Image (tube, grey):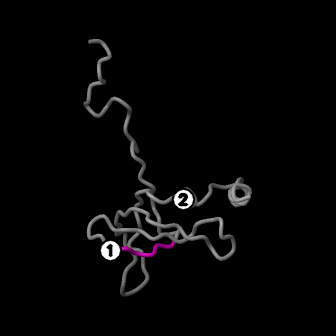
Amino acid sequence: MSVRHSLQALNQFSAQDAPLFMGVSAGDFVIVEAESRVAPKVDGNWWMGQVLFCEGGARDPMVNTMFQVSDVDDGFIYWVNGNEVMHIVRSLDGLQLGSHGCRPLSTTY
């Protein structure tokens, strides 16, 4: 049942790109747009954190819109709105396999 609900949420964006935060899950590292604490303006600042917990939205609890994220620099835990997620950092994001300078293990003895 939960799979059907999540597919319906993704289908509503089939004509356009789905929001980035819909692909976020617990354990992912994300780049978060830093919100100014004085006035709500976008100034290009960002920080990186790891998603600890995902919370469903009020309209559809099966679609995660709020995330509990731990800042990798200071360890503080923040609630992050989905639209503040700028990028999801994957483990091999932008790397070609075999380009990291490590040689593959030889299977011959």
In this figure, which residue is indicated by the disc labeled 1?
Answer: 76
What segment is highlighted magenta in the picture? Answer: 77-81
- Residue 57 in the figure: left or right of residue 7: left
Residue 56: image x %, image y %?
60, 70
Image quarter (top left, top right, bottom left or bottom right) of the N terminus: bottom right
The question of residue 80 being in magenta is answered with: yes
Nearest to viewer (mark 1 / mark 2): 1
Label 2 crowd bin: few (<14), some (14–19), many (20+), radius 10 Å: some
- Residue 18 in the figure: left or right of residue 30: right
What secondary structure predominates along the stretch shown in magenta? strand
In this figure, which residue is indicated by the disc labeled 2?
Answer: 20
Label 1 crowd bin: few (<14), some (14–19), many (20+), radius 10 Å: few
Residue 57: image x %, image y %?
62, 73
Front residue (pair 67, 31): 67
Q: Residue flagged by tag 1: what amino acid is it? A: Phe
Kindly identify the residue that appears in the image at 44 percent across and 65 percent down.
52
Residue 82: image x %, image y %?
53, 68
Which quadrant holds residue 93? top left
Please count the marks in the image: 2
